[in-house]
Structures are given as C-alpha cells and as structure tokens.
Image (tube, rainbow, N blue to C red):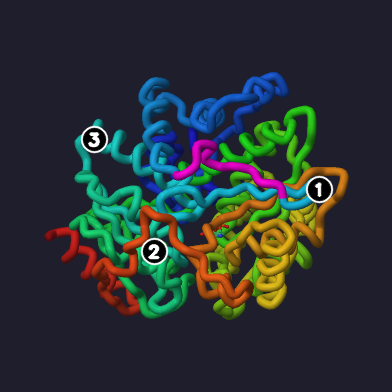
C-alpha cells in the first residue's frame, strides 16, 4: 500500500514513512493510493469480534509490510488496554433509531485517544526498530494535545511538544497537558487562537532546515495513521446495528474534519453508510461551504465546544482531493487561494461532496438546551461537542435509517458548560480525581515562528 500527497508533488511513501512524516513536503496530506474494499461477506465476518479484532481486520490492508501481523496485533492490544470500558466504543440508545457512540472512555476522555494511543505504539515500534529519535509537535484546540502527551510521555525515542492557544482551552484540558512530569513532555501556551497554533505548526514543517535538524514529526489530525485508527469505530458501530444488511448514518461533531473523514473512508471501503452529517458550532465554515460552495475564512468565535472552534479545517483537503478527481494541482491552487481568504468549490466537486456529506450548525443556546433535554429524556449527560452532534442529528435524521451520533468527549472535560445546562457538575472518573492538585509546568511563547523554533531547540537539547 502506497501513500500519495493531495497536492501531487511529494514523494510516494509507505504507511510507516507517511505516518512518521505527517505533513507531505509539498504542503499536502497523505492519502492511500487506492482504498481497500470490504465485501458484504468481509463485513459480516466482523460480527461478534472484539474491538481489537475488528481494528486489526479493518486497518491491516492499509499498513502494507510496515508491521508483521503479530506485531500489529500486539500494538493494537496495548493501545486500547488502558480504556475504561470493555467495549472500547460502546453504543447507547437515545431514542428510537438514534444512537450515541461513546468515544470518551480512553485515558484523556476524548475520542482522540483512539488514534493517539495507537500511534504512540506504532511510533515507538518503528523508531526503536530504526534506531531513530524524533520531535513530535502538535497544535491543539485542547483534546489532541492531552491525548498526544498521554500517548508519548516517557517514551525515550520521542520528545513531544504541544502548542495550545493560551487561555482558550478548558482547565481540565490544560491540566492534562501541563501536569505530566516526564522530561520529554513540553506544553507551550501560544499567544493566539488555535488557527495560529495550526499555522505555526505548518510553518515549522515547511521550514525544511528546521524540520530535518530536530527530526520533526506530526501527529495532528492530518497524520494518516490517526485517520485510519478512527475508521475502526464506524465499522464496529455499523456492525452492531446490523451492517452489512442494514444501512446506518453518522453525525459527527466536526472541527478539523479528521473524524468524519474516517467515516468517509469507511464508506469508500464498502461499509453501508447512508449519510455522513457534519455538525458544526457557530464556527461553521464547513456548513457554509457545503451549503454554498464558498470556503471563506472569518474570525474564530470562541464557543462552549472549543475543540470545534476552527476556521481552517485541515482534513477537508483530503475530501476536496477526491471531489476534484484526485487532481493535486487543482487542490494546490485552492490552498493558494485560501491563503488570501478563501475559495469557491467547483460545481462538480460540490456535487461530489454533497453525495456523501450533509451538514448542520447549532447555536450556543441550542447546544445548552440539548444537554438539558437529553439528560431529562435519557439520563445521558452530553459534553457540549456531543450536544452539537445530537442537536444536528435530531434536526436532520431520516427515520428510515438508524442514526449514530459520535459522543466525542466526556462531560467532565467541560464541566462549566454542563453545569450551566443542568445545574450538575460532572465528576472526573476516579483515576484522574487528583488532576486539580498536581503542579503545572507550562512555557508561554509568542505567535512567532523564530521564537518558537529557538525554544524547541533549547528544550529538546536538555
Ligand atoms: C477534536 C475534537 C472534535 C473535532 O474533531 P475533528 O476530527 O477535528 O473534526 C470534536 N469534539 C471533540 C471533543 C474533539 O476533541
């Protein structure tokens, strides 16, 4: 299996090399050259399997000869051993035909653990075999950073540097990043928004001298291995609900488009997914784009679902690449236009996107009302991101097709919003009960590439 860039100008890589490099050298994102196909029989064979067994079967065709079957199986087992639920991704029913896929039972209580815990294992295995060391950098709107730190803390082949927007992540998110004591963990509070963090991260990757000097590696949601790990729970959920005999739809609280793009891959592999619904908060560039074709950036409006507060949605480039019939030059052209504010998706490409994706947007008030209503009607306490998903799903759902809404974080990660909606402050699970007592370690940094690179050089030299 080989991986190509969405901008058509970077070397073709193996799974392992695409994983270790993150962003392609032409600024594009790696995608598999072809999509492995699952027949109805292959899908039927997943009934009754554990999450780990399902993960092995779904991901194996994408990894080529990077890992032996035995090693890959072991790494998957290790990745999910620390989850607090035997099903890993349990389904709960909210209403007739409406289900919630709980993706928050990992060590940092958000769905990003599914990808990050696995990628930690895969990196450790690959780097140890090669006798190499890398600096992992990530930009986070909150959940990626803690998930990355949790996955890489204490690994000797890796430094992990996380940029988060100063003052714009929740206290639980911040503390999950700033309290680990391991010397290879570096949490940096950048003066700016998440989009600034993401832009500086891209700048560092595009500074090839720096990139090679510190052996930069990326585990942001642009990393193909992360997308791949997320494909698995679309299969496990659809199979639980009767695939391949029954179609299912998914609604996904969306920011960087990584999670929903994994659903798109599952559909392309042959999983009978009817609709994939992009749910956004008031930062609705994706909803506007799918509605009007115009992908036009504006200011970020901080919301109660901060992990979705973005204006540039990185993984959307992968969907555009397919919508433009894999024309890397056309995608590169759109991304150049984006630098000066935005672009218009061609009529043909917009039609291709709409064949797969629906979209909806939820206001702050409606998000809070959804948390309140869902608790009253079902006893389920939603985090604000999951509530955006549930609100959009309820508005758009086709009663003939079961809808699965992805619950992307545990309510205790966003206690202020949940308390506002319900009067009830959700408690952290037992294993993190002392989070607020642990000392924090964080370095402030200006929104400036040179300052950032200097700081990283100093930190990893120690
Ligand atoms: C990251 C995140 C999202 C958005 O996921 P994308 O893959 O970036 O679209 C939604 N909810 C929560 C809780 C998250 O952490």
Q: Is residue 72 visible?
A: yes
Question: Mark 1 or mark 2, which is nearer to you?
Answer: 1
Q: Quadrant of residue 173?
A: bottom left
Q: x, y percentage for residue 303? A: 58, 76
Secondary structure at badge 3 equals helix
Q: Which residue is mark 2?
A: 201
- Which is more toward the observer, 438 or 307? 438
Nearer-N-terminus badge (3/1):
1
The residue lying at 65 percent from left, 63 percent from top is 387
The residue lying at 35 percent from left, 43 percent from top is 120
- Which is more toward the observer, 121 or 373? 373
Label 3: how many residues lie within 10 Å, few (<14), some (14-19) or many (20+)? few
The answer to whether residue 129 is left or right of residue 63 is: left
- Residue 126 falls inside the magenta stretch: no
Distance between the Cα atoms at labels 1 and 2? 44 Å
Secondary structure at badge 2 equals helix
Labelled disc at residue 96? 1
Q: Quadrant of ligand 1?
A: bottom right
State whether residue 242 is above or below residue 118.
above
Q: x, y percentage for residue 313? A: 57, 62
- What kind of secondary structure does the magenta stretch mostly adopt? loop
Nearer-N-terminus badge (2/3):
3
Query: Residue pushed farthest left?
Result: 462
Q: Which residue is mark 3?
A: 128
């Amino acid at each position: 299996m080989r991986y190509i860039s969405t901008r058509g100008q970077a070397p073709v890589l193996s799974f392992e090399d695409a994983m270790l490099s993150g962003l392609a050298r032409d600024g594009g994102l790696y995608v598999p050259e072809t999509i492995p196909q699952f027949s109805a029989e292959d899908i039927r064979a997943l009934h009754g399997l554990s999450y780990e067994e399902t993960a092995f079967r779904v991901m194996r065709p994408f990894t080529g000869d990077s890992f032996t079957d035995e090693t890959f199986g072991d790494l998957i087992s290790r990745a999910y051993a620390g989850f607090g639920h035997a099903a890993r991704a349990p389904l709960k029913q909210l209403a007739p035909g409406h289900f919630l896929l709980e993706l928050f039972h990992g060590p940092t209580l958000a769905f990003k653990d599914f990808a990050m815990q696995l990628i930690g294992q895969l990196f450790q295995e690959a780097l140890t075999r090669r006798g190499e060391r890398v600096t992992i950098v990530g930009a986070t709107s909150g959940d990626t950073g803690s998930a990355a730190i949790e996955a890489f803390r204490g690994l000797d082949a890796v430094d992990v540097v996380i940029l988060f927007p100063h003052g714009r992540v929740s206290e639980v998110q911040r503390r999950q990043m700033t309290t680990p004591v391991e010397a290879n963990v570096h949490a940096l509070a950048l003066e700016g928004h998440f989009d600034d963090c993401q832009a500086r991260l891209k700048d560092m990757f595009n500074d090839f001298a720096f990139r090679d000097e510190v052996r930069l590696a990326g585990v942001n949601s642009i990393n193909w291995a992360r997308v791949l790990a997320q494909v698995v729970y679309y299969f496990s959920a659809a199979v639980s609900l009767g695939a391949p005999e029954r179609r299912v739809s998914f609604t996904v609280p969306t920011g960087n488009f990584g999670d929903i793009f994994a659903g798109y891959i599952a559909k392309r592999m042959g999983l009978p997914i009817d609709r994939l619904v992009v749910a956004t908060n008031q930062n609705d560039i994706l909803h506007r784009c799918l509605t009007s074709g115009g992908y036009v950036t504006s200011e970020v409006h901080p919301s109660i679902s901060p992990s979705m507060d973005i204006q540039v949605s990185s993984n959307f480039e992968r969907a555009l690449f397919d919508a433009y019939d894999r024309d890397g030059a056309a995608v590169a052209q759109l991304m150049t236009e984006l630098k000066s504010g935005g672009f218009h998706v061609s009529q043909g490409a917009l039609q291709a996107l709409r064949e797969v994706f629906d979209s909806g947007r939820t206001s702050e008030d409606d998000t809070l009302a959804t948390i309140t209503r869902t608790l009253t009607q079902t006893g389920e306490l939603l985090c604000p991101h999951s509530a955006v998903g549930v609100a959009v799903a309820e508005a758009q759902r086709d009663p003939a097709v079961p809808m699965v809404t992805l619950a992307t974080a545990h309510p205790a990660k966003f206690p202020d919003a949940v308390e506002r909606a319900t009067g009830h402050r959700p408690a952290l699970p037992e294993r993190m009960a002392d989070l607020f007592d642990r000392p924090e370690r964080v370095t402030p940094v200006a929104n400036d590439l040179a300052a950032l690179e200097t700081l990283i050089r100093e930190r990893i030299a120690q």
